[in-house]
């Protein structure tokens, strides 16, 4: 059986791999949900090499590549928030071919372990209200819808999300 692992994103090459995965996954998954224009804007604004580098070096985000054998199948990012006793799950994206095979559960177990190591009591995330497949996955993993959140992100675009929480 091929082994699954989460590898910390530490090098410029790792960051480039994340940005490449983001472009592939986002352009496949999001245009029917948020439009091709908003997808392209969000990739450039939040998932470019520059944006990811800044999130890691300046904002305290921790990125991990999801690896299955030699294949990089996705990525995740978290941001510990000790002041809120919470771990923010900023990103979890898996390439289409690898979805539905239990990797989200593996990632969530890893993130829960990280949160516990930091002494945090909850994991929370935001997810687009129309991203029905992801909503179903998060609910299956024990997250509940806590509230709605609409956030302007520039250029007339908004993120219309649910905030979902899971208590550890």
Image (cartoon, rainbow, N blue to C red):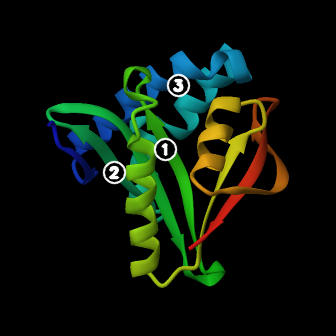
Snapshot quadrant of residue 57? bottom left
Mark 2 or mark 3: name the one nearer the start of the chain.
3
Q: Which residue is mark 1?
A: 92
163 sits left or right of 74 in the view: right
* Residue at x 68% of width, y 62% of height: 165
Is disc 1 in contact with disc 2, using a CB cutoff of under 8 Å?
Answer: no
Local secondary structure at mark 3:
helix
Is disc 1 in contact with disc 3, using a CB cutoff of under 8 Å?
Answer: no
Q: CA distance from mark 1 to mark 2?
A: 9 Å
Residue 138 is labelled as: none
Residue 99 % position (x, y):
44, 29
Nearer the observer, 63 or 121: 121
Residue 101 % position (x, y):
39, 33
Count neighbours of disc 2 (C-alpha within 10 A) and say few if under 14, some if 14 to 19, many if 20 or more: many
In this rendering, the count of numbered labels is 3
Nearer the observer, 57 or 62: 62
Q: Which residue is mark 2?
A: 64
Mark 1 or mark 3: name the one nearer the start of the chain.
3
Count neighbours of disc 1 (C-alpha within 10 A) and say few if under 14, some if 14 to 19, many if 20 or more: some
Q: CA distance from mark 1 to mark 3?
A: 11 Å
Q: Which residue is mark 3?
A: 26
Mark 1 or mark 2: name the one nearer the start of the chain.
2
71 sits left or right of 96 in the view: left
110 sits left or right of 121 in the view: left
């Amino acid at each position: 059986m091929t082994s699954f692992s989460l590898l910390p994103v530490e090098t410029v090459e790792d960051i480039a791999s994340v940005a490449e995965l983001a472009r592939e996954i986002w352009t496949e998954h999001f245009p029917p949900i948020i439009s091709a224009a908003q997808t392209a804007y969000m990739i450039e604004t939040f998932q470019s090499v520059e944006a990811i580098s800044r999130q890691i070096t300046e904002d305290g985000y921790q990125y991990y590549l999801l690896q299955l054998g030699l294949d990089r199948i996705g990525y995740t990012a978290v941001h510990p928030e000790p002041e809120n006793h919470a771990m923010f799950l900023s990103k979890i994206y898996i390439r289409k071919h690898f979805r539905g095979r239990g990797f989200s559960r593996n990632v969530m177990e890893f993130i829960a372990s990280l949160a516990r190591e930091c002494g945090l009591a909850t994991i929370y995330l935001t997810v687009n209200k129309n991203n029905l497949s992801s909503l179903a996955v998060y609910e299956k993993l024990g997250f509940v819808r806590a509230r709605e959140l609409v956030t302007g992100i520039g250029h007339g675009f908004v993120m219309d999300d649910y905030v979902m929480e899971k208590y550890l």
